[in-house]
Image: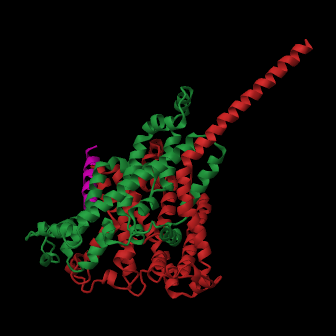
Chain colours: A red, B green
């Protein structure tokens, strides 16, 4: 009897050993397959993003004009970052970036308003979706050029219309240091509304209807329903739009490059534009890299802050 | 009931007026592109040109000193190849990250996802230097490679691959299919609509990209439509009718892609909440 037991036990051990061997062989095959499938993406990301970001970090401690070759590379430690702090154009660019961020909440508010109306209160929903989405689809360069002409200070349709309404001296828009940034912000909002609106409509459609029915029974009015149901239920959507929207304002480049080139008087210079000018026009690689580093940390900081802040007002 | 419908009609009319604000610049662009230069700034605006000059404007844009047919061809080439490569790379990675169980997978996915936080401009300068060193600078191949590794695309497609039920895959495995077969004949057909959505979005984003061609292309004959548009505007400074004809030409293919794939684009954007 004992003998049989040990025999069975050893048999079982042997089987389980075999099974393990087989699964580990299978697992090995899985792992190889996994690596093969993700390899192209991984290689691309490593070469084109990971390596460059490390290089940016290193280059930001150098003074270098890349045309001169690697021999001319000079280590200057924290000088670039120190110079940045005292650089008026950079400070102006940072300020402009901060002002530009206000486009995000404005755009979100308008989009939410439009989304609520289009979602429930109109006919031809599809037409409206397409119409508001057109600017987002179109190329920023072409749109910028069109607006450049529309905003033409003396003869442009915008100012002609304003004059027709009796405004004697309409602003010079992108030619006026006081209005240039605002003009860009208007165009940016005009472009982004379609995207925000589509996302909000999707968010609205995901809110369960019985919440509104229950509120109706309790006799809640439209504003109450908006404040107590729609707005809180949309908070994840709003959070998403806020984060991506603010990060997108840090990347605004096309509008500035086509319309103003940072002028007049640096009134529309933003970090990315100044970075581009420093690196590719003035060929000052080290200084531009230190800006890239600041940009990177700003985006990181904003993302982290928002992840912390969301716990306070986002309902999942 | 009737009152509500009336309200709805009124709202539709009001919203229609608001939507005009979004369409008017496009209408102005189109109508200006058909005018003679002297009539461009005539006020009140002539929405329908009194004196037509469309044919010669578009001829100048397409076959003049900056021939748009060439830039069109460049843009189509770059956008189509980028889209194809990007979809392939992203779909492979998305399948690997969602349907193949291997211990390193989770970590690798986390690394890939983390790179999404890096603003593209932060890695621009080293990319530029790298490209000059390895000879990819000022070539379409380089530009295509640069735009083909999309974290966003991988993330988006991975979401859809995760929706493919494991039973299908296990069944195929029992039939002796390897991952390559399963990817191609089981999983891909199921996620095809998502792939189509991503492909359309990638095409639009690539077509509209200005910054990468600006930095990574130098030769005139390699220019994409956006660069050509900018160059054309600089050269033709005051010829607004010509510039508008160029703008119409730059936007048109996108509008066609968008109108055909409208459902895909809008659904894709609402589903993934994606941004280029």
Q: How far from the left and from the top, in percent, is residue B120? A: 50, 66
Residue B11 lies within the magenta run: yes
Extreme right residue here? A2
What secondary structure predominates along the stretch shown in magenta?
helix
Residue at image coords 55%, 56% = A43
Instruction: Inspect this view and state whether residue A113 appears.
Output: no
Extreme left residue here? B51
- A45 or A180, which lies in front? A45
Q: Is residue A304 left or right of residue B235?
A: right
Residue B169 lies within the magenta run: no
Q: Is residue A147 above or below residue A43?
A: below
Residue at image coords 59%, 83% = A80
Q: Is residue B257 above or below residue A11?
A: below
- B160 or A305, which lies in front? B160
Q: Is residue A258 above or below residue B90?
A: below
Q: Is residue A177 left or right of residue B117?
A: left
Q: How far from the left and from the top, in percent, is residue B129? A: 51, 72
Residue at image coords 48%, 37% = B187
Q: What is the magenta range?
A: B1-17
Q: Is residue B144 left or right of residue A172?
A: right
Give the total of numbered labels.
0
Instruction: Inspect this view and state whether residue B225 appears.
Output: yes
Residue at image coords 48%, 56% = B150
- B7 or A83, which lies in front? A83
Q: How far from the left and from the top, in percent, is residue A109? A: 42, 63
Location of the N terminus of chain A by quadrant is: top right
Residue A174, image quadrant = bottom left
Q: How far from the left and from the top, in percent, is residue A106? A: 43, 67
Q: Is residue A178 above or below residue A289?
A: below
């Amino acid at each position: 009897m004992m003998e049989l037991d040990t025999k069975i036990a050893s048999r079982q051990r042997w089987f389980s050993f075999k099974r393990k061997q087989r699964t580990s062989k299978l697992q090995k095959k899985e792992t190889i397959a996994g690596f093969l499938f993700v390899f192209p993406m991984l290689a691309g990301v490593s070469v084109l993003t990971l390596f460059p970001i490390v290089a940016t970090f290193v280059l930001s401690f150098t003074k270098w004009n890349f045309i001169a070759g690697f021999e001319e590379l000079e280590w200057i430690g924290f000088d670039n970052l120190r110079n940045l702090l005292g650089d008026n154009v950079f400070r102006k660019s940072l300020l402009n970036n901060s002002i530009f961020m206000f486009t995000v909440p404005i755009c979100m508010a308008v989009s939410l308003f439009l989304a609520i109306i289009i979602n429930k209160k109109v006919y031809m929903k599809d037409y409206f979706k397409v119409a508001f989405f057109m600017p987002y689809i179109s190329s920023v360069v072409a749109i910028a050029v069109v607006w450049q002409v529309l905003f033409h200070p003396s003869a442009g349709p915008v100012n002609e219309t304003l004059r027709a309404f009796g405004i004697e001296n309409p602003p010079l828009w992108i030619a006026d240091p006081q209005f240039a940034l605002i003009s860009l912000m208007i165009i940016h909002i005009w472009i982004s509304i379609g995207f925000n609106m589509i996302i909000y409509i999707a968010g609205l459609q995901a809110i369960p209807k019985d919440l509104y029915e229950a509120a109706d029974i309790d006799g809640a009015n439209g504003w109450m329903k908006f404040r107590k149901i729609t707005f809180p239920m949309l908070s994840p959507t709003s959070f998403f739009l806020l984060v991506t929207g603010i990060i997108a304002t840090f990347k605004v480049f096309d509008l500035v490059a086509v319309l103003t080139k940072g002028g007049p008087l640096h009134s529309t210079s933003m970090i990315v534009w100044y970075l581009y000018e420093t690196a590719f026009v003035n060929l000052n690689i080290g200084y531009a890299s230190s800006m890239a580093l600041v940009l990177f940390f700003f985006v990181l900081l904003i993302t982290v802050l928002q992840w912390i802040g969301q716990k306070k007002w986002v309902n999942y | 009931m009737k009152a509500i419908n009336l309200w709805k009609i009124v709202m539709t009319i009001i919203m229609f007026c608001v939507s005009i604000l979004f369409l008017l610049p496009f209408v102005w662009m189109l109508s200006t592109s058909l005018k003679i230069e002297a009539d461009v700034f005539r006020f009140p605006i002539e929405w329908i040109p009194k004196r037509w000059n469309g044919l010669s404007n578009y001829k100048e844009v397409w076959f003049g000193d900056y021939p748009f047919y060439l830039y069109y061809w460049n843009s189509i080439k770059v956008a189509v190849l980028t889209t194809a490569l990007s979809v392939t790379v992203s779909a492979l990675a998305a399948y690997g990250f969602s349907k193949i169980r291997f211990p390193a997978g989770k970590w690798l996915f986390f690394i890939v996802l983390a790179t999404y936080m890096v603003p593209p401009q932060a890695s621009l300068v080293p990319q530029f230097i790298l490209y000059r060193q390895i000879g990819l600078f000022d070539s379409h191949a380089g530009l295509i490679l640069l735009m083909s590794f999309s974290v966003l695309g991988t993330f988006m497609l991975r979401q859809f691959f995760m929706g493919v039920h494991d039973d299908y895959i296990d069944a195929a495995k029992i039939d002796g299919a390897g991952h390559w077969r399963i990817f191609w004949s089981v999983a891909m057909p199921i996620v095809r609509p998502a792939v189509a959505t991503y492909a359309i979005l990638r095409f639009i984003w690539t077509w509209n990209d200005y910054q990468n061609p600006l930095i990574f292309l130098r030769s005139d004959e390699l220019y994409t439509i956006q660069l050509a548009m900018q160059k054309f505007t600089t050269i033709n400074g005051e010829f607004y009718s010509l510039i508008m004809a160029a703008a119409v030409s730059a936007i048109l293919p996108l509008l066609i892609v968008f109108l055909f794939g409208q459902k895909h684009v809008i659904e894709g954007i609402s589903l993934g909440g994606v941004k280029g």
